[in-house]
Amino acid sequence: MGVLHLVPVPIAAAAAGAAGQGLDAVLPAATRAVACATTYFLAENARSARAFLKAAGHPRPIASLQIIEIGHEPPSGQIDGWLAALRAGAPDGGQDAVLLSEAGCPGIADPGATIVARAHALGIRVVPWVGPSSIVLALMASGMNGQRFSFLGYLPQGQEPLRERLLEVQREAQRGITQVFIETPYRNERLLEAIARTCAPTLRLCTASGLTGADEAIIVQTIAQWRALLARGGGPKLDRRPTVFLLMG
């Protein structure tokens, strides 16, 4: 059997300099080495995967690598075919594969979990490698409860469903359970305004944007402080910037 390696990639463009420059700060040498020793890749996006492998200094011509694009929602009917190359006894089987997201860690707010689950079912060894996760980095930097937390993914888009969901999230946050969620970057400021408008003034909100990048900004304030800041036209510029939101009482 081959091995399915789960390799994180940088979450900020500035961290992916040419020929590996800049990667040292976010990816250990061992993580880069396993990516550079592999020729078969399952990638959320083939273009970003090629850019990462070039930046990591892959010794082979990038065009010679086999990069399968799995997309945002890998179709279950194709997973066995993708994993066939790892299975002993299959034609050209027994080779290793690397699973790559567009940013951060495969399977964590990104595609990959269904592929990993199927690999386990087929008896394929799965190895996770160390690298950046915006969710973990934001939780570390927030000063909020890192022993009891929930990652909620995306909240509803409609105004009333969003308000109702935020009230549910608030109840959990007031119990001391850190609530972690994300939004499509161009809707970040709309979400920030909804949180400030809906949630209790004593609740704490952290916005962590541009993590590991040159424009990284991590702000923690009470909802009352956020309301005052937004009312005078202040606050962070979150539009089209990857941002993690965290709430706790």
Image (cartoon, grey):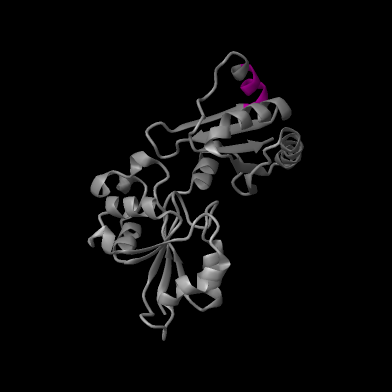
Quarter of the image that includes the N terminus: bottom left
In the image, what residue occupies the spot 55% across and 51% down? 109
How far across and down, in percent of the image, does residue 113 sit?
55, 62
- Is residue 225 part of the magenta span, yes or no? yes
Q: Taking the image as drawn, is residue 201 in sight? A: no
Query: How many discs appear?
Result: 0
Q: Is residue 212 left or right of residue 64?
A: right
Residue situated in front as seen by the camera: 179 or 86: 86
How far across and down, in percent of the image, does residue 32 sit?
32, 57
Residue situated in front as seen by the camera: 233 or 78: 78
Q: Quadrant of residue 163?
A: top right
Depicted 1 relative to depicted 209: above or below: below
Segment colored magenta: 222-228
In the image, what residue occupies the spot 57% across and 67% down? 76
How far across and down, in percent of the image, does residue 72 sit?
52, 54
Q: Taking the image as drawn, is residue 100 in sight? A: yes
Depicted 125 relative to depicted 8: above or below: below
- Is residue 9 part of the magenta span, yes or no? no
Q: Is residue 176 left or right of residue 101?
A: right
